[in-house]
Amino acid sequence: MSSNKTLTQQVSEIIVSTRFDDIPDAALDIASECMLDAIGTTIAGASEKSGVGRISIEYAKQIGGSGDCTLIAGGVKVSAPVAAYANGTMCHALDYDNTWWPRNHPASPTIPATICMAERQNSPGSEVLRAIVLAFELQGRMRVASIGRNSGGIFHHPGIGGTMGAVTGVGTILGLDADQMTMAFGNAGSRAGTMTANHGTMTKPSHSGIGSQMGTEAALLSSLGWTASDDIFGSGGFYDALYGEGHSDPPVMLKNFGKPYRMVDPGVSYKLYPAKYSIHRSIEASILVAKENDIDATKIKNVDIFYPPTALIDRPEPRSGLDGKFSIQYGAAAGLLDRHVGISTFTDERRFAADMESLLPKITIHEDDSIPADFPHSWIIVRATTYDGQTFEKKCTELKGQAGVPISRETRLSKFFDCVAGAISKKDAETVVAITEDMRNVKDIHQLMGILRNATPH
């Protein structure tokens, strides 16, 4: 690779030169698992109770025109960018899609865009998996290049790095060459930018939809000859705009690219609760302390939560069930009251139930600087005190499904079947599982997309 190439050109050359046979089986297996997980969360997101799925589908039908890309749970095909937007938004609607460290949602901005373009291009399953692996890798390396530099917490990465991940996935399916991929990245740099100020609202899940759509559009335009900067990742470009000059390390993107792939090591975290990952430990600790001590939540006098410095999750009075996904207090209250947290936890009905209204004011949070803030090494303590003076405590360190803490195939499938229940038949759900698990041998994904298109929101 020529040293006089720009950083962006070098990244593009690595991506387009990586063949399916270059990717280890471990990464391909994880890509198919992530694909199934994303399909499940998208179908579940179509029925999200605040209306994110319903409005996304209605909007896509209004503006989508004729096309050849499936609108999941919409019953129709629309244009590629519109399908990418709606499907990406629904994939993130429940905040149930996977995550990793450094923080980002690698699947929801990339997999919906990649599979709708694969449908349009009649791509084989092997190309789908190659595109997903590369899309994840590019996103992950972008986050490593910006580790510890989150622009004051202003920007939300699914609409930033996720946009570039979508370029990678869609561009791979389209067969862009290195020059075209470079131009697509440059174009996408002017399309990226979503804000954490919208956490707890309908707009937050649209960040993945925006990343998915903008990446798709940039790749399509590049395939037609559209030009842009040839070094959007270099000096004065994407990183400097987000983090300020000198506050990132873009060349890290090139270092040992794919050796190993980041979806393998450090790995992907699968969410077992449909909420912001930063509150999962409080949920887990609360469920366990309630179960292990058979605590009657109506007899709780107060609850203390000790947690690391973490932005955006101190919401003592969530405005809605949707807002509760970002409240450490609400997650703990639900765990203590119900000893289970699922999709129905984050409805307005549950949020404003009398027992929830009674328990929430009793919860006090304590930000503890001695607890590591980096998620893989962090922990949370939940301490519940009852009116008779008894104190019960639970510390949560590892989460099931967290990168490095694998979950079984049975657990992954249980989540998937729960997500699609009532939307597709058990037979169709089993067909989706069979297709995704054998994706490397699938001739095309039309049968799969037909099932997803005809899913019924409920």
Image (spheres, helix red, strand yellow):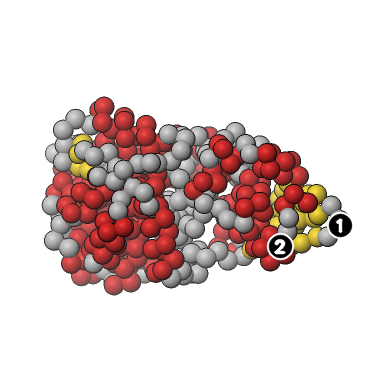
Q: Residue at x 41, y 68 (%)?
A: 410
Q: Callout 1: helix, strand or loop?
A: loop
How far apart are the alpha carbons under marks 2 and 1? 15 Å
The residue at the point 68 percent across, 39 percent down is 354
* Label disc, if present, on residue 200 of the rendered structure: none
Which residue carries the number 2 mark?
294
Task: Give the quadrant of residue 292.
Answer: bottom right
First along the sequence among labels 2 and 1? 2
Q: In percent of the image, x 32 and y 38: which residue is there?
A: 86
The answer to whether residue 299 is seen in the rendering is yes
Res. 182 visible in picture: no
Q: Position of residue 402 (x, y in %)?
A: 50, 63
In the picture, which quadrant includes the C terminus?
A: top left
Please identify the residue farthest to the right as the structure is shown.
389
Type of residue at label 1? Gly
Foreground of the two, 137 or 452:
452
Badge 2: few (under 14), some or many (20 or more) residues near its Cα, within 10 Å? few
Q: Nearer the viewer, residue 270 or 190?
A: 270
Read off the residue under disc 1.
389
